[in-house]
Amino acid sequence: AETSNGAKIFEANCASCHIGGGNILISQKTLKKEALSKYLENYNSDSIEAIIHQVQNGKNAMPAFKGKLSAEEILDVAAYVFQNAEQGW
Ligand code: HEM
């Protein structure tokens, strides 16, 4: 996956709520490794798939991006989130 494209997709679609890997609506549910491991279902067994699932379907106050972003764009942004979670944003 292309993480530079992922960065652009993140800025355009995610940063409004997740600036710096945070979460402006539910402060503990950040995109940091510790939070993803704790709150995101299946993150510990298949991290990229778990992020893709959340982006496609949304959850509570987070909108679904299926139909808004292509499958390739969702993969790119998921890879970007995973890489930043590993690197500590
Ligand atoms: C949660 C990714 C866009 C609001 C999450 C989580 C991920 C994620 C991976 C799980 C975090 C955790 O449980 O610790 C993304 C990506 C986005 C995006 C990649 C862009 C494609 C947005 C936007 C909003 C938003 C635009 C606000 C309108 C939320 C909220 C949660 C959340 C409220 C917590 C959901 C819950 O468990 O109740 N996001 N997000 N997200 N996101 Fe996003």
Image: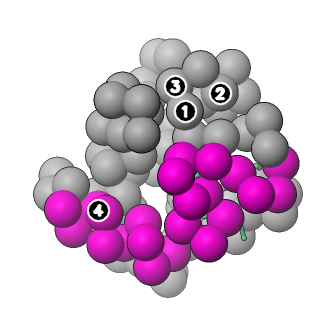
Q: Name the residue under label 4.
A: 6
Q: Can residue 72 be seen in this view?
A: no
Which residue is painted at 63% across and 48% down in the image?
22
Check if mark 2's residue and mark 1's residue have beta carbons within 8 Å. yes
Residue 28 is left or right of residue 54, and the answer is right
Label 2: state its secondary structure.
Answer: helix
CA–CA distance between discs 1 and 3? 4 Å
Residue 60 is left or right of residue 16, and the answer is right
Q: Mark 1 points at which residue?
A: 32
Residue 86: % across, % down: 36, 26
Residue 59 is left or right of residue 36, and the answer is right
Q: Name the residue under label 2.
A: 35
- Residue 40 sits in which quadrant? top right
Between 35 and 70, which is closer to the camera in this rendering?
35
Check if mark 4's residue and mark 3's residue have beta carbons within 8 Å. no
- Residue neighbourhood size for the residue with mark 2, other residues' Cα within 10 Å, grouped as few (<14), some (14–19), many (≥20): some
Dividing the image into 4 quarters, which one contains the C terminus? top left
Up the image or down, 8 lies above or below 53; here it is below
Q: Bounds of the magenta span?
A: 4-26
Which residue is painted at 42% across and 66% down in the image?
10
CA–CA distance between discs 2 and 4? 20 Å
